[in-house]
Image (cartoon, helix red, strand yellow):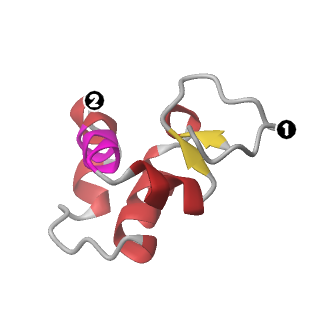
């Protein structure tokens, strides 16, 4: 599992847009270099169900153990 907090702006944007099919995001080029851009995207990712994030190999835990594949995180 990878912590969502280890993801960059473009990674989070891609997950939200491509994997989770959210279509109400601002254009990436408008937010990728803004201080608030990553926070906005992470807040949208945190709103998703934990089991959905787990299926994508992601966890909400701040420092995920790469060898830990438990789905209860």
Look at the image and say whether residue 44 sits in the magenta stretch: yes
The picture places residue 21, in percent across and down from the top left corner, at 32, 76
The picture places residue 16, in percent across and down from the top left corner, at 36, 63
Q: Secondary structure at mark 2?
A: helix
Look at the image and say whether residue 69 sits in the magenta stretch: no
Q: In this picture, which residue range is highlighted in magenta?
A: 40-47
The picture places residue 31, in percent across and down from the top left corner, at 25, 48
Picture layout, residue 15 above or below residue 18: above
Numbered label attached to residue 35? 2
Rendering quarter of residue 13: bottom left
* View extreme (right): residue: 67
Asked whether the beta carbons under mark 2 and mark 1 sit within 8 Å of each other, the answer is: no
Is 61 displayed left or right of 9 in the figure?
right
Q: Foreground residue, 17 or 33? A: 17
Q: Quadrant of the N terminus?
A: top right
What residue is drawn where x is 17% and y is 61%? 26
Rendering quarter of residue 33: top left
What residue is drawn where x is 30% and y is 59%? 29
- State the CA–CA distance, disc 2 to disc 1: 31 Å
Judged by its main secondary structure, the magenta piece is helix
What residue is drawn where x is 56% and y is 53%? 54
Say few, some or many: other residues with alpha carbon within 10 Å of mark 1 (under 14 / 14 to 19 / 20 or more).
Answer: few
Name which of mark 2 and mark 1 comes first in the sequence: 2
Picture layout, residue 67 above or below residue 14: above
Q: Quadrant of the C terminus?
A: top right
Q: Which residue is mark 1?
A: 67
What residue is drawn where x is 45% and y is 63%? 15
Numbered label attached to residue 4? none
Rendering quarter of residue 20: bottom left
Is 18 displayed left or right of 71 in the figure?
left
The picture places residue 63, in percent across and down from the top left corner, at 63, 23
Q: How many marks?
A: 2
């Amino acid at each position: 599992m990878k912590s969502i907090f280890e993801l960059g702006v473009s990674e989070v944007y891609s997950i939200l847009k491509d994997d989770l099919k959210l279509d109400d995001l601002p254009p990436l080029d408008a937010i990728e270099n803004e201080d608030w851009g990553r926070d906005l995207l992470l807040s949208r990712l945190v709103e998703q169900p934990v089991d959905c994030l787990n299926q994508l190999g992601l966890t909400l835990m701040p420092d995920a153990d790469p060898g830990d594949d438990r789905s209860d995180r």
